[in-house]
Image (cartoon, helix red, strand yellow):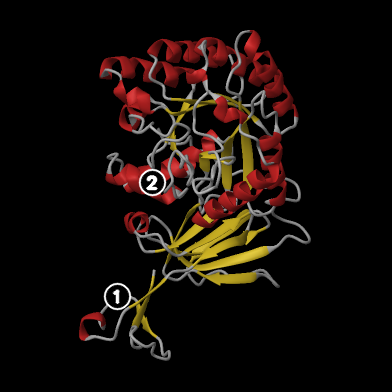
Amino acid sequence: MSADRKQPQPPEDGAATGAGATSLLLSHARLADGRAVDVRLVGDRIEAVGTAGSLGPVAGGARVDLTGHLLLPAPAEPHAHADTALSADSPGPAPYDGSYDGSYDVPCDGEEVQRRATEAALLQLGHGATALRAHVRIAAGRGLTSLDAVLRTRRSLHGLGELTPVAVPRLLTGVAGAEERALLRDAVRRGGVVAGGRPDGDPDPAGHLEAVLTVAAEHGVPADLHTEGDDPVWLARLAAMAGELGAGVTIGPCAGLARLPSEVAGRAAERLAAAGVAVVCLPQGGCGEAGSRGVAPVGLLRAAGVRVAAGSGALRDAANPVGRGDPLEAAYLLASQGGLAPEEAYGAVSAEARAVLGLPEVRVEAGFPAELLAVRGERLAGVLSLAYSRIVVHRGRVVARTSAVREYCDSAAALDLPRQARTKRPPEPGGPQAGPVVRS
């Protein structure tokens, strides 16, 4: 299901125009429809789009030459795990193995969580994700230590990207769940925090669901539930309750939905669509439980009208020690294995992901937010195949650059490579001898 089309809205007061607004000209970029354009950014909005060579920068503004780059709306990350990211090689007990046992009682080092969460967010920003939603555990044995660390990370990233944590308790029902129900309320009171949960591990999944949605409704925040989605009765209960909640409800990764009989899964998908529940799939692998694998049935969900976004999930933690956290890889997997067209696959990590996060739509048109990703390449399919060099724009300014250069030895076979640029450099002993250079 594609994002609803909205007309461009004028920038909010002081956002894009007026004295002191920064400006940036992105020249000679190629759009997904094949047009070569100049794009002028003023403040945090796109001020104008014209044919290549037709626009100039605002006086004193900067210019970035995007010749050879495809310019796209920036992706967003709707399902990361900030507190466990980059912990696969950490010494000592795993900070989280996905279970509801003593692993929650491992001492939590807030400074270490903040360091890893910051590094992970910057890695994903470099991939192009200018907005991230990250699940963070809270528990009676840990309190809000990890959440506070991620909130500090969010403040440190101000101006580079947007990070929104999801407070995820382990147990919310019965007498034993009273403390974590109070923790969840305390978490969302801090502002900018989504109410989360993991109903699959609670003895009473339906009660867990009701507790999360109640807190979300009380505080007017979205709800985001980490679930395999393999219980059709629970999914029906979710759909019934979600329709009464004003804020958005998201579930994921829902790989278990693919293990249900197609008729049962289809009915569940129709209920989710009717209730406006969005699903975030994780094409790069499961997260939270090291043995959880598979991907939600994207085609079935989309056919039923469910909004489906794609996230990255685990980033080099115990659940996926080789997780990359790259939204373009998620799109690549949806296109190569999930049967989606490249445009649909990229939409799952950009337009649909932004919609799940409650962010405004981005199009490369005047009036839209200046949240953009430039990738070296000519067509979207090629970009999803080999997306090495990237330029990331957030709020109208370049916040990250990644450049890749491949070098080949000087031989007749390499001389006719496309887009080559020969450079002179001293030969290295045993290495390529001043051969052609191809920028990727």
Report the amino acid beneath label 2.
Answer: Ala
Tag 1, which secondary structure? Answer: loop
Q: Position of residue 388 (x, y in %)?
A: 42, 63
Q: Is residue 50 left or right of residue 261?
A: right
Q: Is residue 412 above or below residue 139?
A: below
In the rendered image, is residue 6 in sight? no
Q: Which mark is residue 331?
A: 2
253 or 355, which lies in front? 253
Q: Quadrant of the C terminus?
A: bottom left
Total marks shown come to 2
Q: Residues within 10 Å of mark 2 (few under 14, many from 20)?
A: many
Tag 2, which secondary structure? Answer: helix
The quarter holding residue 309 reads top left
Residue contact at pointers 1 and 2, CB within 8 angstroms: no
Q: Position of residue 383 (x, y in %)?
A: 37, 58
Please give the name of the residue rendered at 78% of the width and 60% of the height, measured from the top-left corner.
19
Q: Is residue 108 above or below residue 379?
A: above
Report the amino acid beneath label 1.
Answer: Pro
Q: Position of residue 178 (x, y in %)?
A: 68, 13
Using the numbered discs, state the Cα–Cα distance from disc 1 to disc 2 in whole angstroms: 26 Å
Q: Position of residue 412 (x, y in %)?
A: 21, 86
The quarter holding residue 281 reads top left
Question: Which residue of the protein is positioned furthest toward the top in this rendering?
Answer: 174
In the rendered image, is residue 317 in sight? yes
Please give the name of the residue rendered at 58% of the width and 45% of the height, measured from the top-left corner.
131
124 or 181, which lies in front? 181
Q: Which residue is mark 1?
A: 418
Q: Residues within 10 Å of mark 1 (few under 14, many from 20)?
A: few
